Image (cartoon, rainbow, N blue to C red):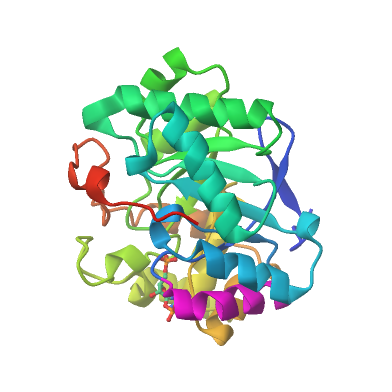
């Protein structure tokens, strides 16, 4: 059966999330409103932001300028580590909703595990559980949680996270994390789904870009599509949510134009085989004291 742009994934609490969303990591505030508006004009119905991106206000502005009803758009944001702790996280929710200009969030997740202070991570997650019970958020989740950290969280949590957003692109597929998420009924959401992290200045990565990978180029050529479209279709066919970032109108449109072709099992396997095991982003198992000194401004 073919998949269409209006289809959704069902989260473990019955809430439905669009198959693909617009990411705004590294989108400067001055370009965010237009990117969000362009995405919504091109059929996107999911925007993924974060307090730490410092562009939540502009995401809200893009949503308002689209003229679409609020309930048609799935809004996801993240609590930054310096706001972890029960009261601090409840306040961080207020900051986020005021900046975005919404009463309720569709998905609120913890941006990173604070491995040096995991008790604060647990307290933050318990605040998300309170917000869920109060109907202020429709679903809650985490980001960058390894299988071990997920297990630690689940011993203290009442609500299983709906989503775990992790670095995932053809050069870093994190199969054990995908399997752990699936075993708990958690939807894996791919950040940097087309491998932007492999070529962003200042990040590690494998030192080569997924966008020029010969295998991806060959598969793209076979379907008259682009490598980015092939990677996004690969996520989709393997049941992952993805949030490609672009500020370029043509590429924003290109990234959601993935519903008119299908990768074969052999092509999916060839993409899986590109995994290098090398992550581009920070290792979530390493304590990062600098996370606590990055302050999220009031609304
Ligand atoms: P730009 O915003 O100029 O389009 P990821 O979401 O995997 O991290 O990738 C984001 C990076 O990939 C950004 O540098 C973005 O730049 C670029 N990008 C987004 N879409 C495409 C595309 N369809 N083709 C090539 N590059 C893209």
Q: Which residues are magenta?
A: 27-42
Which image quadrant is residue 285 in?
top left
Residue 273's place in the image compared with 209, above or below, is: above
Seen at 34% across and 41% down, the residue is 81
Rendering quarter of residue 73: bottom right
Residue 279, percent across and down? Answer: 26, 52
Q: Residue at x 73, y 39 (%)?
A: 15
Extreme-top residue of the structure: 155
- The secondary structure that dominates the magenta segment is helix
Q: Nearer the viewer, residue 117 or 276?
A: 117
Residue 221 or 181: which is nearer the viewer? 181
Q: Is 2 on the left or on the right of 98, as rendered?
A: right
**Ligand 1 quadrant in view:** bottom left
Question: Which residue occupies the extreme front position in the image?
Answer: 298
Q: Answer whether residue 271 is magenta in the image.
A: no
| Residue 169 appears anywhere in the view | no
29 part of magenta stretch: yes
Residue 141 percent across, percent down from the top left: 52, 36
Residue at coordinates 45% horizontally, 27% vertically from top-left?
86
């Amino acid at each position: 059966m073919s998949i269409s742009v209006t289809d959704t994934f069902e989260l473990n609490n019955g809430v439905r999330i669009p198959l693909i969303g617009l990411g705004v990591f590294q989108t400067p505030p001055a370009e965010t409103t237009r990117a969000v508006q362009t995405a919504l004009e091109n059929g996107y119905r999911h925007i993924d932001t974060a307090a730490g991106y410092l562009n939540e206000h502009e995401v809200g502005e893009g949503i308002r300028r689209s003229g679409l009803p609020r309930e048609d758009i799935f809004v996801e944001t993240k609590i930054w580590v310096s706001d972890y702790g029960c009261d601090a996280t409840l306040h961080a929710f207020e900051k986020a909703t005021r900046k975005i200009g919404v009463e309720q969030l569709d998905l609120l997740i913890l941006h990173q595990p604070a491995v040096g202070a995991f008790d604060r991570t647990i307290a933050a997650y318990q605040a998300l559980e309170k917000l869920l019970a109060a109907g202020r958020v429709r679903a809650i989740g985490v980001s960058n949680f390894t299988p071990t950290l997920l297990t630690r969280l689940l011993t203290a949590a009442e609500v299983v996270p709906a989503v775990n957003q992790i670095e995932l692109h053809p050069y870093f597929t994190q199969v054990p994390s995908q399997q752990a998420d699936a075993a708990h009924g958690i939807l894996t959401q791919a950040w940097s789904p087309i491998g932007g992290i492999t070529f962003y200045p200042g990040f590690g990565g494998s030192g080569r870009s997924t966008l020029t990978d010969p295998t991806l180029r060959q598969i793209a050529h076979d379907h008259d599509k682009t490598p980015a479209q092939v990677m996004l279709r690969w996520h989709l066919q393997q049941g992952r949510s993805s949030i490609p970032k672009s500020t370029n109108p043509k590429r924003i449109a290109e990234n959601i134009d993935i519903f008119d072709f299908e990768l074969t099992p052999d092509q999916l396997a060839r993409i899986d085989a590109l995994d290098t095991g090398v992550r581009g982003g920070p290792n979530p198992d390493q304590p990062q004291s600098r996370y606590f000194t990055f302050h999220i401004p009031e609304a």
